[in-house]
Amino acid sequence: MTVDLPPDEPDIDDRADGRDETPNERADRNWLELLQELRVMQTGTQILTGFLLAVAFQPRFTDMDELQRDLYVILVALAAVATILALAPVGMHRALFGHHRKPDLVRIAARIVRIDLAVIGVLTIGVTTLIVDFTVNRTAGIVALVAALVLVVALWLALPRLMRGRPRSVETVED
């Protein structure tokens, strides 16, 4: 028996993949998987944020034109939003700890992670664009923007949709 859940919802049916788990065990496992994703996202965000903060203290920062400075400020704001989003599930977990709300927490945290991925995607594209625009020229910056956008869309959106449309392999062990 297969259970089709909407693509934006984590698999919360304890029988959907043949695992012998209670709903609480599944919520615990899904929470741990979300935490691993958040760790990776947070590391990448910290690196980008650190880079952005260091840029303002470089001697050539004043050489940026108005568009580059505006993009820089937007990117700093996006880095702050990405950091806040990555920490939100942890803060929610702490606030809900001991209240037996883990399935709800997992569902909401999964949505926050999706939003954070979108913010990090835009942030990554923007940082790439800013660096290439500043170090090479505006045309190269636009080319970098389009290339980064194509990569993010292809790898983060198109490939998973393509994989969802194909039948599962018999050897599949994990979600």
Image: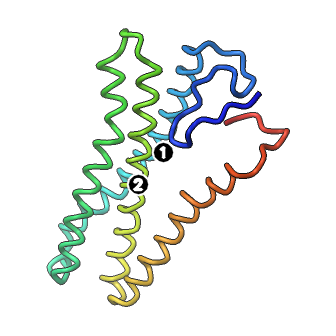
Marks 1 and 2, the one that precedes in the sequence: 1
Question: In this view of the protein, which residue sits in the foreground, 88 or 104?
Answer: 104
The residue beneath circle 2 is: 118
As shown in the figure, which amino acid type bears the numbered disc 1? Val
Q: Quadrant of the C terminus?
A: top right
Residue furthest to the right: 170
The image's mark for residue 40 is: 1
| Camera-side mark, 1 or 2 | 2
Q: Quadrant of the N terminus?
A: top right
As shown in the figure, which amino acid type bears the numbered disc 2? Ala
**Residue 56 pos. (x, y %):** 19, 67
Question: In this view of the protein, which residue sits in the foreground, 143 or 36?
Answer: 143
The Cα atoms of the two marked residues, 1 and 2, are separated by 14 Å
Q: Choose top left, top right, bottom left or bottom right for residue 172.
A: top right
Question: In this view of the protein, which residue sits in the foreground, 63 or 113?
Answer: 113
**Residue 129 pos. (x, y %):** 36, 75
